[in-house]
Amino acid sequence: MVTHMGNGTMTRRATLALVVLGLSLGCGTVPATVADGATGAATDAASGDLVLVVGATGRTGIYAVEQLVDRGYRVRALVRNPDKARAALPAGVDVVVGDVRDPATLDPAMQGVKYVISAIGGGARNTVAGNGPEEVDHLGNVHLADAAQRAGVAQFVLVSSGSVTHAADYPVPFMRPVLAAKLKSEDYLRASGLPYTVVRPGALIDEPTGPGHIVLRQGDGPPGQISRVELARISVAVLGSAAALGKTFEAAAEAGEAAGDLEALFAALQPDPSPAQ
């Protein structure tokens, strides 16, 4: 299971033209950068808080679970296949069975949870009926957000995707329904009243280490690329960060000089406009 969200309501004009993967970035904010390996200010503040990871056995979710455990969080994984989860995840992770397509299975998983990380996705080429982008990426995240709100969750982190606001003319046709579904889930989360953070990764690469410096932007310009390990690091670092609340941003990794840490990058980002705006 994986979830993604888009920002259809936000438009920002750039104050600086940027070039990413040979493309000119004409909208967004000036990017903030950080050296690879830096962490957010919440590193020492986990204090055993319980985090629900949805999509925990996916290629990004596994990294998120590992990093959460390393940082002292208690971790609960919502999965459809518990045997697969227990074989793949670190010892001590609380594995609970549920399905984002079935709202009735979600409330028990939310009990005692402070933070939610949703890294689910139906898959661009999934041919199983009822398991596509609309059912998983859109409605699955809607169901999760509703359950999180009922449980009083302190922060919902949605792992979305770059280019969600360009779904209609995205150059890879089979990705268009995925991006459109993610955008709808993003918009729903932003309007829900839940404290949230939306992370839009660039093109994902599976190598454990990627380019040297993390770059955060806003405006949904050319997405760049980022490793799943780095994406997981960002998704974990935003937990408990007041500077990251109510913000949607793109995340990529590039070569070049960088300074500061992730918390400083979160603080440099602009908050999302009100859904009514």
Image (spheres, rainbow, N blue to C red):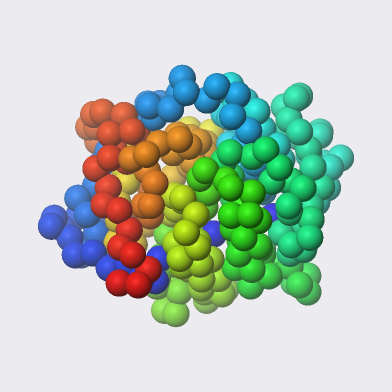
The x and y percentages for residue 237 are 45, 34
- Residue 129: name its quadrant: bottom right
Q: Quadrant of the N terminus?
A: bottom right
Query: In this rendering, does residue 205 appear at all?
Result: no
Q: Nearer the viewer, residue 178 or 244?
A: 244
Residue 186 appears left or right of 249: right
The x and y percentages for residue 268 are 24, 43
Which residue is farthest bottom? Answer: 168
The x and y percentages for residue 92 are 75, 25
The x and y percentages for residue 160 are 50, 57
Total numbered labels placed on residues in the image: 0
Residue 3 appears left or right of 89: left
Q: Nearer the viewer, residue 41 or 27?
A: 41
Q: Residue at x 13, y 57 (%)?
A: 15
Taking 162 as reference, is 135 above or below it? Answer: below
Q: Residue at x 59, y 29 (%)?
A: 49
Which residue is farthest left? Answer: 15
Residue 174 appears left or right of 219: right
Taking 200 as reference, is 131 above or below it? Answer: below
Query: In this rendering, does residue 191 appear at all?
Result: yes
